[in-house]
Image (cartoon, grey):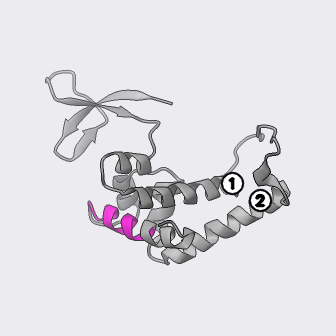
Amino acid sequence: MRQLVERELTSEGPRRHVGAREKKRTVTINLAESPLSWLHARGHLDDRLFDAGERLRADYERAQLAPSVTMRWDPVRVRTTGDTGLTPGERQIAAKARFDGALAAAGKGLQDVLWRVVCAGETLPDAERALAWPARSGKLVLRLALDRVADFYRIA
């Protein structure tokens, strides 16, 4: 899905409000793009780290850890060959165990940025501000966390 908007391009990155008085350089941003895929598309994350982040996010979603604010409208599941032997509840429990194991493998100091960027979809600057970190420090910490998660998932 694409949700494109125009943003003013500044030395610190795109700014939300484009001034109408002055002619500024602008950039088109896809708001539907995840922060992880944004970093990967621009070469800040290699394929191994991106795959680790996607596996973590998939386990987060399979475990249904995100808060529910309304009635559940889950689609009807169709049995495939990958579903043999496990009930839906068992698959959810297995995904939760993998998610918890991956966060534990990342380590106590790295879990915060990992969860914020990969699972909650926060941008790196927003996560850095929320964690009271210096600007531009989140990318390095996220890479370290994703490297440990890739080791946990045995992604080569």
**Label 1 or label 2, whichever comes before in sequence order:** 1
Name the spot of residue 33 as percent of width and height, x first. Answer: 44, 40
Inspect the image, locate mark 2, and give the three-letter code of the amino acid beneath it: Arg
- Is 49 magenta? The answer is no
Name the spot of residue 18 as percent of width and height, x first. Answer: 25, 28
At x 52%, y 54%, the residue is 54
**Relative vertical location of residue 88 with respect to residue 2 in this rendering, above or below:** below
- Check disc 1: other Cα within 10 Å, few if <14, some if 14-19, many if 20+: some
Circles 1 and 2: CB atoms closer than 8 Å: yes
Query: What secondary structure prevails in the magenta region?
Result: helix
Name the spot of residue 22 as percent of width and height, x first. Answer: 14, 24
**Relative vertical location of residue 122 with respect to residue 132 in this rendering, above or below:** above
Magenta residues (range): 135-145
Q: Nearer the viewer, residue 93 or 14?
A: 93
Q: Secondary structure at mark 2?
A: helix
Q: Is residue 55 left or right of residue 8?
A: right
- Is 142 magenta? The answer is yes
At x 63%, y 58%, the residue is 59
Which residue bears the numbered disc 2? 91
Residue 144 sits in quarter: bottom left
Residue 31 sits in quarter: top left
Which residue bears the numbered disc 1? 62
Q: Is residue 119 left or right of residue 3?
A: right
At x 26%, y 60%, the residue is 136
